[in-house]
Amino acid sequence: MHRGSSLRPAVHIMTPSTSPRDVQRRHFLRWLAASPLLASAGGLSTFEDLIAQEAPRRTFDDLVTTAQEALDVFDLEKVAASKVPLAHWGYIMTGVDGEETQANNRAALERIYLRARRMIDVSRLDTRVTLLGREWPSPLLIAPAGSQRAFHPDGELATARAASARNHLQTLSTVTSTAVEEVNRARGEPVWYQLYARPNWNGTVALVQRVRDAGCPVIVLTVDLNGGSNRLTVERYGRIDERDCESCHREGGRADPVKPMLRGLPTGSRGGADASMTWDYIHQLRDITDQKIVVKGLVTSEDAELAVGYGVDAIWVSNHGGRAEGSGRGTVDALPEIAQAVAGRMPIIVDGGFRRGTDLFKGLARGATAVAIGRPYLWGLGAFGQEGIERVLEILTRELEITMRAVGTPSLADIGPHSIGVD
Ligand SMILES: Cc1cc2nc3c(=O)[nH]c(=O)nc-3n(C[C@H](O)[C@H](O)[C@H](O)COP(=O)(O)O)c2cc1C
């Protein structure tokens, strides 16, 4: 099977047969086909042969050979699909069950339309946002994603360098393939650190202590995988990948190398989150660290109220990009009830299916303070490393700015529920 072929509609670029230039060329070819010169050269003899030879079909896919040539993030998706090993591509793309939740993240965004106002001075834009005491030039954030060296040899370092070059907030995954200290050096300042609670409390304490010592100001506690997840697409891709996975995955007799942040932690430290976790966990974390605490993976107003009550510093509305539970609900549709419950008491971050500037705008209009992306920057990484991620950030920033001008909202504060509608 051609890798990523399902992502590659075979769109052929053909010069319209009615264009004057084309007509001229066809005339020339017809003349050439009839010419004794060609007959004596042997080989091609018919007009059709010449056309086939002269106009090799190019596809749109061939047009993106550098990061800068990508026009939207989906261009980078196609390139990454052809470069990232199949099993790892499956890990990026997988959702759960039949991918309904992942699809609905997009569908919910597409149902929303923009209400563009005219004749407003949009010659100067203000996209600055303040998150937990720190100002950022853009509300576009980089969500945590594990194992990034599976997509490009530079992995999390490429992400950190791109985040640094374009000055975006980056959150590093617990299961990063590069240690936090190295990532912070590449980023030029400490990143936020995403925490999967360890099955062993002492393991959590040691991990939090390490990232605190590394200077990370914020712990992002992910709570949407505590019950496990039913990921089928990644299984399927793994089965059709014919490479020898063992050669990379086996280390010191283990079935899988231990991730750098989990090395040396008390036993049971390879597992995921803790199924027994309740809201008291926030208090436990508070007792061991003075870092800010963000809870990632909330999708209901009830949980938003609890988060406020338990004193978390920000809420991250997320369904893990449709890779956690099969709720079927797009995150942008969860935003209004959460924004209402939070009532401005803390920042709200959202992710899940955001692929265009218009999508970011819709998230902000629904009450998010900032919007994070997962797969799009992994596509950039898989396609062209650091440059690919920078291009993703550049494209989405430009698209958001165009949208803000088009809708008549010169600053983020001007964007609100009045800026959008749903049919
Ligand atoms: C390959 C991959 C790995 C991920 N790893 C983590 C992780 O380690 N921790 C976490 O909290 N979320 C993880 N996520 C979820 C993202 O942080 C984010 O919620 C999601 O990707 C956003 O949806 P999007 O991919 O549609 O933009 C991962 C997502 C992907 C695609």
Image (spheres, rainbow, N blue to C red):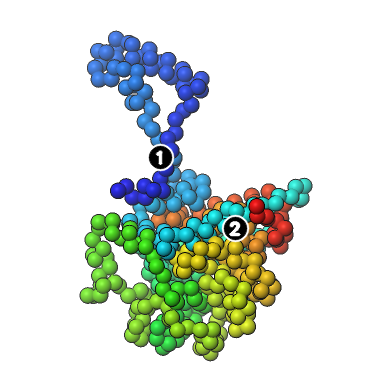
Q: What residue type is labelled 2?
A: Leu
Look at 25% across and 16% down and name the residue there: 41
Other residues around mark 2 within 10 Å, as few (<14) / some (14–19) / many (≥20): many
- Give the labeled residue for mark 2: 360
Residue 102 x %, y %: 48, 60
- The one of 31 and 271 positioned closer to us in this rendering: 271
Is residue 180 visible in the rendered image? The answer is no
- Which circle's residue, 1 or 2, is located before the other in the chain? 1
Q: Is residue 252 left or right of residue 223?
A: left
| Residue farthest bottom in this picture | 287
Q: Is residue 37 left or right of residue 111?
A: left
Look at 70% across and 51% down and name the residue there: 115
Look at 55% across and 81% down and name the residue there: 291
- The one of 329 and 332 positioned closer to us in this rendering: 329
SS for callout 2 = helix
Asked if 75 appears above or below 298 in the picture, the reply is above
- Give the labeled residue for mark 1: 10
User: For residue 309, what is the image quadrant?
Assistant: bottom right
Q: Are marks 1 and 2 in contact (CB under 8 Å)?
A: no
